């Protein structure tokens, strides 16, 4: 881990320990961020930066999905930090996007076949290939560094949802339940219903289901009453009427709707008009420029 990342973690951990010793509750991020979003006039739209945003990672000295990048993403005004969770061979949760590590690090292999010690020996790559001082972060390090700075929107990579209970225990341990949303596929809804039936607990914002039909929206409303929902768009035609109708339907059901920022600026304006209030994007600065020009 880079010296800068160690400083960020030390500072964040110190703040968390002070709060724990005083018994003070940490003010939640997600409930405040999402409150009144559908009713805001003019529309308020949030940016979910893909892997925290990496458009200028070398200049920022902060690789995607790194502890250092949490502070950079916050400073740039991206409200939500989209990220990815995998599990090591010895049972630790770490922040890695790809199925294999060649693109992201200076080695090759799979996270699921490595121990945490082996993972920590890796160094992350910038987008253009240069090696950084950043190491792969654990979920625990992310929760500490992101406390009161950002809301994480985490994808559970294949097989990791089997350990959702363990992940929630870790999130609860760090009093970070208000600082994380898990984006999950609709086809796994039964898994999370079982989690609740067996005594697990969720915040209203904890699960963001990815859906593509009205029946799926109705099911999620009835079973979870989640705050947010993601509607899948066609890359070829992101503003086709069927998609716009589904966005309007979900919003009428009380959901805050997220979509990917497919298409161009004209499409984004149309999507906002239909009711989209969170854009997941790999070009957060471009989206931010559009939103700022709309506000003026």
Image (cartoon, rainbow, N blue to C red):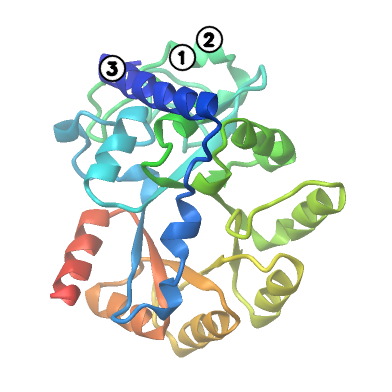
Numbered-mark total: 3
Query: Residue beneath label 2, please?
Result: 117
Sequence-first disc among 3 and 1: 1
What distance separates the C-alpha of mark 1 from that of mark 2?
5 Å
Residue contact at pointers 1 and 2, CB within 8 angstroms? yes
Disc 2 element:
helix
Q: State left or right for residue 129 relative to residue 17.
A: left
Would you say residue 23 is visible in this rendering?
yes
Viewer-proximal residue, 41 or 195? 41
Q: Which mark is residue 133?
A: 3
Q: Quadrant of the N terminus?
A: top left
| Residue at the far front in the pictured view | 22
Sequence-first disc among 3 and 2: 2
Q: Residue at x 75, y 73 (%)?
A: 222
Q: Residue at x 43, y 37 (%)?
A: 147
Q: Residue at x 57, y 66 (%)?
A: 227
| Residue at the far right in the pictured view | 198
In the figure, 85 relative to 28: above or below?
above
Disc 3 element:
loop
In the figure, 197 relative to 16: above or below?
below
Viewer-proximal residue, 49 or 21? 21
Q: Quadrant of residue 43?
A: bottom left
Q: Residue at x 34, y 37 (%)?
A: 70
Query: Residue beneath label 1, please?
Result: 120
- Number of residues whose C-alpha sits closer than 10 Å to that of mark 3, classed few (under 14), some (14–19) or many (20 or more): some
Q: Quadrant of the C terminus?
A: bottom left
Disc 1 element:
helix
Q: Horizontal and vertical percent for residue 208?
A: 58, 60
Q: Horizontal and vertical percent for residue 131?
A: 26, 20
In the figure, 268 relative to 2: above or below?
below
């Amino acid at each position: 881990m880079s010296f800068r990342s160690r400083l960020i973690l030390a500072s964040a951990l110190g703040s968390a320990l002070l709060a724990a010793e005083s018994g003070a509750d940490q003010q939640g991020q997600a409930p405040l961020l999402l409150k009144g979003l559908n009713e805001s006039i003019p529309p308020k739209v949030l940016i979910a930066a893909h892997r925290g945003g990496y458009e200028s990672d070398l200049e920022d000295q902060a690789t995607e999905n790194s502890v250092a990048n949490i502070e950079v993403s916050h400073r740039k005004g991206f409200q939500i930090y989209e990220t990815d969770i995998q599990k090591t061979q010895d049972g630790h949760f770490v922040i890695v996007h790809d199925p294999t590590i060649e693109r992201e690090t200076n080695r090759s292999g799979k996270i699921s076949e490595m121990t945490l010690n082996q993972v920590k020996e890796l160094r992350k790559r910038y987008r253009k290939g240069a090696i950084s001082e950043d190491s792969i972060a654990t979920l625990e390090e992310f929760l500490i560094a992101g406390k009161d700075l950002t809301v994480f929107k985490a994808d559970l990579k294949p097989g990791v949802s089997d350990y959702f209970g363990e992940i929630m225990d870790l999130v609860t341990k760090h009093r970070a339940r208000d600082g994380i949303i898990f984006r999950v596929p609709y086809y796994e809804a039964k898994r999370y219903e079982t989690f609740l039936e067996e005594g697990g607990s969720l915040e209203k914002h904890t699960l963001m289901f990815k859906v593509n039909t009205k029946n799926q929206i109705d099911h999620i409303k009835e079973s979870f009453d989640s705050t947010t929902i993601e509607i899948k768009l066609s890359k070829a035609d992101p503003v086709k009427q069927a998609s716009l109708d589904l966005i309007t339907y979900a919003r009428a059901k009380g959901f805050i709707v997220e979509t990917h920022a497919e298409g161009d600026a004209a499409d984004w304006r149309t999507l906002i008009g239909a009711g989209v209030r969170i854009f997941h994007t790999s070009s957060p600065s471009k989206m931010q420029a559009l939103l700022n020009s709309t506000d003026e």
